[in-house]
Image: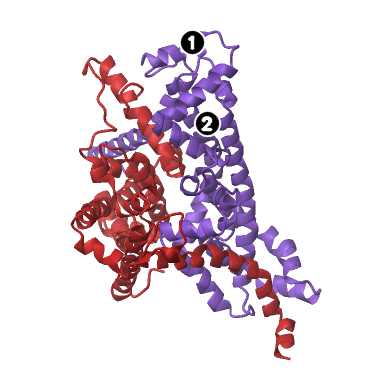
Chain colours: A purple, B red
Amino acid sequence: MKTRKSTGEVLFNWINILLFSLFALICVFPFYYLFINTISDNSLVSKGQIIFLPKGIHFDNYVEILKIKGLSNAAAISIARTVIGTLLTLVGTSFLGYALGKRELWHRKLWYRFVIVTMYFNAGIIPWYINMKMLRMTDNFLAYVVPSIVSPFSMILFKTYVESIPASLEESADLDGAGYITKFVLLIVPLSTPIIATVAVFSAVGQWNSFMDTLFLMSDSRLFSLQYMLYQYMHEANALAESLRQAMSQGGVVADVTKLLTPTSIKMTVTMAVVLPILLVYPFLQRYFVKGIMIGAVKG
Amino acid sequence: MKSKALLKQPGFRLFLMILPLLVIVFLFSYLPLQGWIYALYNYKPGRPLFSCEYVGLRNFTRMFVDKYSTQDIVRVMRNTFAMSFLGILTSPLPLIFAVLLSEIRWVRFRKTIQTVTTIPNFLSWVLVYSIAYAMFSVNDGFVNRALMRLGLIDEGINFLASSSHVWLTMLGYGIWKGLGWSAIIYMAALSSIDQEQYEAAEVDGASRLQRIRYITVPGLMPTFFVLLLLSIANLINNGMEQYYVFQNAMNKDYIEVLDLYVYNQGMVGFNYSFATAVSILKSFVSITLLFVANSASKLIRGDSIF
């Protein structure tokens, strides 16, 4: 049934759409601006000529930054910690969630609380740092991937999900004499793919974005992540100049002055390179993120 | 022979399987508590702890007795509360966002807006800083370039180094990053409101505004309330990442929140002991706030928040 709308309502609709379009533009425009500045003639960028449209389009910046040794190494570290860290979190956290949902688990309640409390209480960053140092986790790649093996929040998500799987399925496996690991791998994991995907995307974004752990724990530049390199470029002119010098001495091929790297082009191109994976992947995985916050909201 | 019987229990075998995971939790979340002992000493990095001077509770009393430390704490707490209160003040924004968005009947538009506005939530603060730099810096910033092109200004304005309105700009970045994402939880709550109520209201001739006022908003209140209590519980935990990356010599007096202060004291100034004492106090205050918020929730809603 369609009723005629009053002028007030029509006006309301349009103002509403206008407001949201404006906010969406504020969310999107910075990425567009960064992008056109990374693909435009670098000398025009330095002169501040690139505002709304790209000029002198080339993609050499993205090739040139790979020649900066520290940067390609940082990219490898970021990818490695994202892949390994996410896999370890998935294995550890999902099995823990499965086990903590089992009634027969020895002192189940105690261990459940033991894990959950860590969400609300921590010792503070300095004691944490002293502890990490004592455990020889400074300048150690393991510091990126081992502490996150157990993620209490994801554990809750997983436990809630597994509890919704009919118990009769597992009971029939019990009759065949299957152990916990067999049941977990062959029965529970295939039935839990939606929640596994949710935990995976959250964990991967967390790993990719992580910055503070490098700041606290790593002094060896071979272990710097992309996020940390970007931070250095933004705040320390020295780090930037050093990388620029490196790129110059490497890339003797580029004679074209309009394509030479500048401090600005390094900053913007690295930013774009770190943002792009998220921008490209997010629209496809959005439903998993939303699912995560929904289940979390029901529980929390 | 009790141990043998225990080993035969499937529940105990399962426990043994998760034991390595529990050890990880212990090592990285419980073991750090031993570091609290540093608060009782005047620790100097590079020396064994027990060869350092034992000072008892002096690191704790220093916050209230020593003139300079007290000044610092007052300044830092002012910043912490200012940012938290601004956050609480703007906490209805996601609710309004969700209500207004749900009023749009054009589904494709609504979906696109949702996708686009949630993306910033998945950027790290380093990236947000870098994007803010691209927008506001003197030479490369879009705003300065556009204003100069329009002839409105002759020289670039250094928005990022300015110390005025730091609280507000930090709030602004926070809203840019989080608004769309925070609204999602309200969108979920919206879809759980009984549709029959709307139909009944329509039959009774309620206007759109009345429907929002008397059905939608009351339906969202429980969610709003829980989130409000949680933000009160986190009053002094505003984290340090955002403030760390935006910090500079110019804005330091206004941007340094408690978490950042602890970092600056400990990791930059090497006052491990004092920083630990501050963070111990902070832990106790925030646990207390959490319990207060939880009992408030039990009292008012009849349900705990966690």
Q: How many marks?
A: 2
- Residue sitting at the far front: B51
Residue beneath the point at 42% across and 22% down: A264
Name the residue beneath numbered marker 1.
A258
Amino acid residing under circle 1: Thr
Measured as percent of width and height from the top left, residue A84 is found at: 64, 48
In front of the other: B34 or B11: B34
Residue at image mark 2: A273
Q: Position of residue B166 (x, y in %)?
A: 25, 41
The one nearer the camera, A89 or A142, is A142
Q: Position of residue A12 (x, y in %)?
A: 26, 39
Residue B17 location, quadrant: bottom right
Q: Are marks 1 and 2 on the same chain?
A: yes
Tell me if I can see residue B219 in this picture: yes
Viewer-nearest residue: B231 or B115: B231
Q: Amino acid at mark 2?
A: Ala
Seen at 41% across and 12% down, the residue is A44
Q: x, y (%) of residue A52?
A: 38, 19
User: Horizontal placement of B146 versus B20: left or right?
Assistant: left
Earlier residue among tags 1 and 2: 1
Q: Is A29 drawn above or below residue B62 in the view shown?
A: above
